[in-house]
Amino acid sequence: MSYINKQPKFKLDYIVMFLLFFTIFSGASQNSNKDLSINIVTSFDGESIEKDKWYVTKNNDSIQITKLRFYLTNFVIQTEDKKNDSIFNSNYLIDAFNKETLKIILSNTNYNKEDKLLLSIGVNEHLNTSGANSGDLDPSKGMFWSWQSGYINFKMEGKSPSCKTRKNKFQFHIGGYQKPFESIRVLTFKLSAIKNNELTININIAHFFDALQLSSQNQIMIPGKEANDAADRLPQLFSIDE
Amino acid sequence: MAIKHKDLFFDYPEYWPKPNYDFSKLSMSENEFQLGRQLFYDPILSRDNTISCASCHLQATGFTHVDHDLSHGIDGRIGTRNSMTIMNLAWNTSFMWDGGVNHLELQALAPISSENEMDETLANVVDKLNESKKYKSLFFQVHQDSLVTGQKTFLALTQFVVMLNSYNSKYDKYIRKEAGGDFTEQEKNGLSIFRENCASCHKEPLFTINEFKNNGLKVDTTLNDYGRMLITQNSKDSLKFKVPTLRNIQFTAPYMHDGRFETLQEVLDHYTADVQESKTLATELKKTIQLSHIEKVDLLVFLRTLTDKEFLFDKRFSFPNNNL
């Protein structure tokens, strides 16, 4: 009987990681890289997001927001000649009710005011299909669907008397990575707004409800067309202080 | 940085295809295997600490839930499907009857969070493990860090289940021309009947093609389970379910996604006399399979050669002796 002893190839991975590590450090010694701080400010038309606070949408639905969590991932510095510098492992879970998550520090970043910052709302296909991940992507964060694998890119829950649902709840779990319903969306910002190595990204939740009548649409829980359409609205929520 | 323990070898017959699973996140260490084994057999994974993976996946029956058509979990609640077997998972390309889970490392999230199974959140499981001296120490042995995370919990479970490989049945020995692999005329005849009528979906050596098929079962109107379509939302996938492996089938009763057949005889009767025509019926079943009574008996005799007692009774896979 002849079996092949199969052993996973670890060595190569580690060499690659080591080289990457080395490159980052040698890069740091040559360029004057800086930390880029990103402040995330969530609001509802300028009002801060607080539990138990009431807001009124454009369509006159009164709402409370009880949960607001979403992924911002794959930060890229793009130079004027369209050269992309991806920031390794830049995947962040933002929770509007957890202050610690509202400041992202991209350390040792090489950028100029003429550059652009690219980032994604949601998690890319590769990370959706590569098994159990760590850090903010850990499946214990409650942002991974169990019966149908995939990250929830954007999760908002709350209450409204307009919702004829159990406890008047609305729940929007927007995700899905498979074509044609990929719900990840890319944002592009000019870095000219940076002051003291700080950039503020504003997220106005009110815009999510601008084209939404909560009495008729108050629940998205699976990938599909509805999630995809809702994802199309997400970039409109984001802006930077110019 | 170095891998300190690489004492596990993932063996399989050289004529098998390459595994689909990417092993790179596993330590392939005995410590991680034993940690995964502890977790697999520990009801700590469930909300009220009553249900473990082994509650529905018993080793002696190919790691499935014998004698239950629909598997039951916490508070005696009953699910909607028959639990699947656990073996040769590294070759699977998707998990669950509907393929909803895309990766072995994330499979356990489904039963842990299903309200009919363990009804727990992974975050709570991680909290419970972080409060356990035993587990802190076991995780430390694997990662040189005692902090338990969701990822590390799943990797340990994966390290255990990915080693549950079955390739030493009488059939395997027959293929390899080894001692104990002498087929009787009846078994040989059964194998050729199998190859002619069943192997296009239950392809050797894994006895599955990892695809989803509508095998012509009548819709059970108490469940109205449309299978794969619930995942893809594509009507072309209506009534399609994962083609399961047939290894150790002698002990994995009941059969089908809803466990409707208690015996293999009933399964053969279905395929030869009761296949329901529909838009999504597998093309392989469009022409009725015709088997005489004697041919059915020979086929059943062959299916018993897929039993791998070395696997079913391997002490390394059984309930761990807890001296920890």
Image (cartoon, coloured by chain):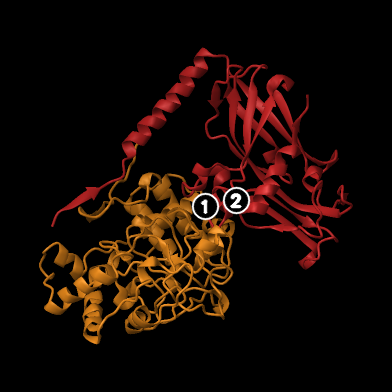
Bin the neighbour count of mark 1 within 10 Å (Cα to Cα): few under 14, some 14-19, many 20 and up: many
Q: Residue at x 38, y 66 (%)?
A: B283
Report which colour depicts chain B: orange
Cβ atoms at labels 1 and 2 below 8 Å apart: yes
The residue at 42%/67% (across/down) is: B41
Quadrant of the rendered structure where residue A186 is? top right
Q: Residue at x 46, y 64 (%)?
A: B96
According to the picture, the residue beneath numbered tag 2 turns out to be A141
Q: Quadrant of residue A103?
A: top right
**Label 2: which secondary element:** helix
Q: Which mark is residue B150?
A: 1
- Is residue B71 left or right of A1 when viewed as pictured? right
Write down the chain letter for disc 1.
B
In the image, B278 versus A233, the foreground residue is B278
In the rendered image, what is the letter of the chain coloured red? A
- Amino acid at pointer 1: Gly
Residue B16 location (% of width, % of height): 24, 55
Which quarter of the figure has residue B222? bottom right
